[in-house]
Image: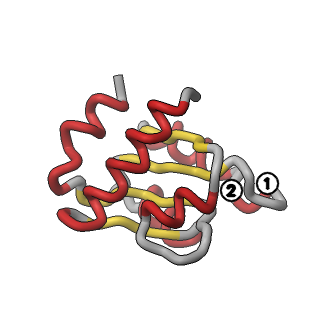
Amino acid sequence: MDEKQADKVYEAIEIARTTGKIKKGGNEVTKSIERGTAKLVAVAKDITPPEITMHIPLLCEEKGILCIQIPSKEELGAAAGLSVGTSAVSITQEGEAKALISELSK
């Protein structure tokens, strides 16, 4: 993934955080995928151990949900409005990020 795409993901999460709804953390994100409410899922690559998030891309594939791996859990946490890093974030209501999300899914 290039930096531009990662920045778009962070931007989409920030916009959805203020104008829509997001879920933060592996468990919440997993639930949103299983319920089919996730529109976009971002997973941090630098999570240890990787087993924590290994199931998420597979679940997304099963459900046909866009899943993007991004380099940094710290940046992902910051985009989600957290002071700490997070393993995964899902956008459940796009709000004003709808156009950005459809651009990412191309």
Residue at horizontal 55 percent and vertical 27 percent from the top: 2
Residue at horizontal 48 percent and vertical 69 percent from the top: 24
Amino acid at pointer 2: Thr
Residue tagged 2: 53
Foreground of the two, 67 or 1? 1
Residue at horizontal 26 percent and vertical 38 percent from the top: 100
Residue 44 placement (x, y as % from top left): 63, 52
Residue tagged 1: 50
Amino acid at pointer 1: Pro
Residue at horizontal 74 percent and vertical 52 percent from the top: 46
Relative to residue 34, is residue 42 depicted above or below?
above
Q: Residue at the top extreme?
A: 106
Foreground of the two, 106 or 82? 82
Residue 105 placement (x, y as % from top left): 36, 30
> SS of the residue at dot 1?
helix
Look at the image and tell me in which quarter the N terminus lies.
top right
Mark-to-mark CA distance, 2 and 1:
6 Å
Q: Are marks 2 and 1 in contact (CB under 8 Å)?
A: yes
